[in-house]
Image (tube, rainbow, N blue to C red):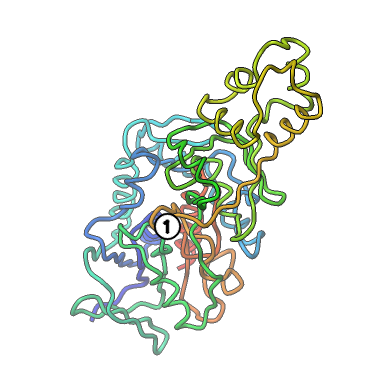
Amino acid sequence: MTDHDAIVLGAGAAGMMCAAVAGQRGRRVLLVDHADAPGKKILISGGGRCNFTNIHTAPDRYLSANPHFAKSALGRYTAADFSALVDRYGIAWHEKTLGQLFCDSSARQIVAMLEEECARGGVAMALGQGVSAIDHADGLYRVKIGDSEHRAPALVLATGGPSIPKLGATGFAYDVARRFGLSIVQPRPALVPLTLGPEEQLFQSLSGVSTPVEVRWNRTRFREAALFTHRGLSGPAMLQISSYWQHRTPIHVDFLPDRKGEWLIDEKRARPRATLRRVLGEALPERLADALLDRLAMQGDLGALGDRALRHAGAQLSDWAFHPSGTEGYAKAEVTVGGIATANLSSRTMEATKAPGLYAIGEAVDVTGWLGGYNFQWAWSSGWAAGQAI
């Protein structure tokens, strides 16, 4: 039996951050993961370059049953703080669109940095070993790993959610949380492609076509690229809206967000002999323009089309309703919406109010960020907060 000050379950972004911070504060930390190497989700992120944070990080970029929960952690360990850590390791990075920060070279640099931070804190690692039992008695959490038992007054759940099961992701953190009396906000796939049913098969034939759009669900809007796939809709805009979308409700797409009002009528007056197909093909990818015109059942020269018909077409193109049949599920989801309820946790320390010494951080918690580095920043911030507390 081995004693520690804290046992951290999950050697991903949040877990490594927590373990490193606690270790460098003098705590004896054991970091456990069933995978044989740490940071596997980090390695595949951002196309292998890790979109490690976003300079526009703010609490309103996160979904949670309690929209105020993330404020404390995000305010105490910021995107600038993590960027400064990256800079101290000499890792070159660049800003892409919408405040997204990526490594110039490889996500492996971020994993190596976190490994070194853990080493500086004297963190012990138990990798490639599953947890077979967890108990609590006399103020200590007992965790059985393989044939050995480890004890600590603090246990941190950092095993994420069930998204990307090919990396071994499961709902393990939820099971442990429930065992200690914590409630779970129903989890579902997020940042995930949407599927379309047979009635919208026409659009599935556009696989590979991408175009900038503004997509809306209720009052939530995102303006980014949409990508048609053989199963439905993907691309940044659709991944973003998927986190909000609810089954059996439509999403609305503005295919021409820069064309407002009666632009088709203006085009008619400027060049009446131009065909509607040509005008739309100049504004959109031709395959998409053809599919939309097929649905609108409109063809011919602009001059031969009535203003009322053109006005109707413009309105349709700016507010096209899709009725997704579902999503591509956890296998293609980048993250999970829902998880361990924030009502059970301290927003400052991430400690469970009903189970002293038990902490939950990162994706395991009901805090889910937008696409673009926000979820990594939540991992760093929540991991830092717990690491300061244990």
- Specify the quadrant of the image occupied by residue 87: top left
Above or below residue 293? Residue 4 is below
Above or below residue 320? Residue 124 is below
Q: Nearer the viewer, residue 5 or 204?
A: 204
Looking at the image, residue 342 sits to the left or right of residue 305; the answer is: left
Tell me the quarter of the image containing the N terminus.
bottom left
How far across and down, in percent of the image, does residue 56 sit? 59, 40
Name the residue furthest right. Answer: 308
- Specify the quadrant of the image occupied by residue 168: bottom left
Q: Residue at x 64, y 17 (%)?
A: 275
How far across and down, in percent of the image, does residue 41 sit? 35, 52
- Residue for badge 1: 14
Q: Residue at x 64, y 25 (%)?
A: 299
How far across and down, in percent of the image, does residue 313 sit? 72, 31
Name the residue furthest left. Answer: 147
Tell me how many marks there are: 1
Above or below residue 12? Residue 83 is above
